[in-house]
Image: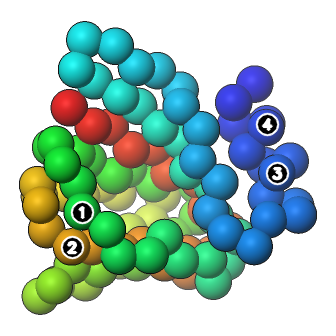
Amino acid sequence: MTIKKIKEELKSSSHPVAKSLHHGNGIKVLLIGFNKGMILREHKAHSPAKLTVLEGAVSYQEENRVVELRQYDEVEIPVEVTHAVEALEDSLCILTQG
């Protein structure tokens, strides 16, 4: 039901929609939905993380690199490095932290 909730909220949202899928024992799994053109503004990860695209395409941007990710592509997110994510298409991503 989490994905369905995200997709429903995206119909009226002007920013990415994130929901927790699972958390416990130092691990958190989030689902993040984007409409094309939405941006998850610059921020830092405080624990090791991996972003995987389930649907669509996004641009992952760090200080000195830009990685275009399409369905099933993934990228490791370094700890304490400023980064942002921009949706190139309507997209659904899974973020694993911990």
Q: For residue 43, what is the image quadrant?
A: bottom left
Pointer 2 residue: 82
Pointer 4 residue: 4
Circles 1 and 2, Cβ within 8 Å, touching? The answer is: yes
Please state which amino acid type lies under the numbered disc 3.
Glu
Question: In front of the other: label 3 or label 1?
Answer: 1
Q: Earlier in the sequence, mark 4 or mark 3?
A: 4
Residue shown at 53%/31% (left/top)?
Answer: 20
Pointer 1 residue: 44
Q: Callout 4: few (<14), some (14-19), or many (20+) C-alpha neighbours within 10 Å?
A: few
Instruction: Calculate the distance from the C-alpha at mark 4 to the C-alpha at mark 3.
Output: 9 Å
Pointer 3 residue: 9
For the C terminus, the quadrant is top left
For the N terminus, the quadrant is top right
Question: In front of the other: label 4 or label 2?
Answer: 2
Give the number of callouts.
Answer: 4
Question: In front of the other: label 1 or label 4?
Answer: 1
